[in-house]
Image: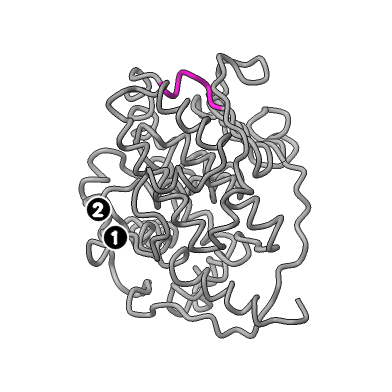
Amino acid sequence: MKKLLSFLAIFSFLCTNTVNLINCANIVNNKTYLPPITFKNDLKVNSETNINLEKIYLPHSVLMQQRGYKGTFFNQYKKDIIKNLTDAFLSKADINLEIKFKTEFSTYQQLQYYLKIEQQNYWQNLLNNICQQYQDNLKQLILLFYNFVANIWNKTNISEILKKMEIKNAIDGDNNVLGQTNNHQTILLNKKVLSCAFEKTINSEWHKGQFTTNNFLHILIHELGHIFYFYDWEEFKINHIFYLKQFLGHKINNLNKFSELDKEKVLKIFANSNYGLSDDDELLAEGFAYWLLTKQSMQTKIWEFWNEYFTSYLPQIRDKERKCKWC
């Protein structure tokens, strides 16, 4: 499997089907999906934070001022029911939340001691080459990522992912490709995403609706999202698109009452960037970056739901998988 993040998409060249996606080089995906492991329909959600479409929701005021409906499904299909659910998803989170899970590594130094030498080296190389003002942020996010995957899988699994990271002048001969992920093994980054000048680029593209965040480290975290999802599929056969659709269906009260909505449409409305709308795998990676990078002051229902999915819903799937002797 190969992931490409390209300026082709930034220039609003949005592909709509698998053939076009391959042709425009945004994504090449040879992953074969098997049917997901199915359990009795008893996975729990926090119903207190559910969306009630009989209510009127107001979207996050700061988000509207800076970005409006750019990057949303409603921006393409202006229907009342889509706007109503979009406003609900973009409404301010009920409370300021923090990402919380068991901490395996308390400090970046402690994590480095645990990683293999080649992993230590490529992270150090990234730190040496990144815009200096973001070095501390990068360390914090590396620590957060590894604590998450150690918590969701097992501490021993983290040495099996991301065995190589390279900084390139051009990826596959194309200087416009920003990042590429090959399975769960390799990330290639265009050196331009590490330059201080990239700060203006990512901010501008977020305002246009291209990405879910305007964080300088968005491209790296997006690619780490691909690493996580691919390993989760390859090792544990967790089909995140299937479970995300299931989760969102439970998070909207009486969804079946609304004939114009189904789980496929809800998933598209949940997407929060043009790049996420281009493909299910990109939606997942964009959501992962949104979850790890969004500031508390900008948290929306979308962030709240991603947080619940990763920290509550997904662990339930894993617990059931471990107990499922016939899986």
Range of residues picked out in magenta: 189-194
Which image quadrant: the N terminus? top right
The image quarter in which residue 198 lies: top left
Whole-angstrom CA distance, mark 1 to mark 2, is 8 Å
SS class of the residue under badge 2?
A: helix
The image quarter in which residue 205 lies: top left
Q: Closer to the N terminus: mark 1 or mark 2?
A: 1
Q: Name the residue located 31 percent from the left edge and 57 percent from the top edge.
A: 300
- Amino acid on which disc 1 is placed: Glu
Left or right placement of residue 108 versus residue 162 in this view: left
Badge 1 local density, few (<14 within 10 Å), some, or many (20+)? few
From the top left corner, tell me how far across and down residue 113 is, in percent. Answer: 46, 45
116 vs 269: above or below: above
Q: Which mark is drawn over residue 198?
A: none
Q: Name the residue located 39 percent from the left edge and 40 percent from the top edge.
A: 70
- Amino acid on which disc 2 is placed: Gln
Badge 2 local density, few (<14 within 10 Å), some, or many (20+)? few
Asked whether 37 or 258 is in front, the reply is 37
Task: State the predominant SS element of the stretch in magenta.
Answer: helix
From the top left corner, tell me how far across and down residue 190 is, in percent. Answer: 52, 22
From the top left corner, tell me how far across and down residue 226 is, in percent. Answer: 58, 45
Asked whether 143 or 96 is in front, the reply is 143
Q: How is the image coloured?
A: one colour
Residue position for label 1: 98
Q: Name the residue located 50 percent from the left edge and 78 percent from the top edge.
A: 257
Q: Are marks 1 and 2 in contact (CB under 8 Å)?
A: yes
Q: Name the residue located 42 percent from the left edge and 21 percent from the top edge.
A: 129
The answer to whether residue 193 is magenta is yes
Residue position for label 2: 296
From the top left corner, tell me how far across and down residue 327 is, in percent. Answer: 75, 76
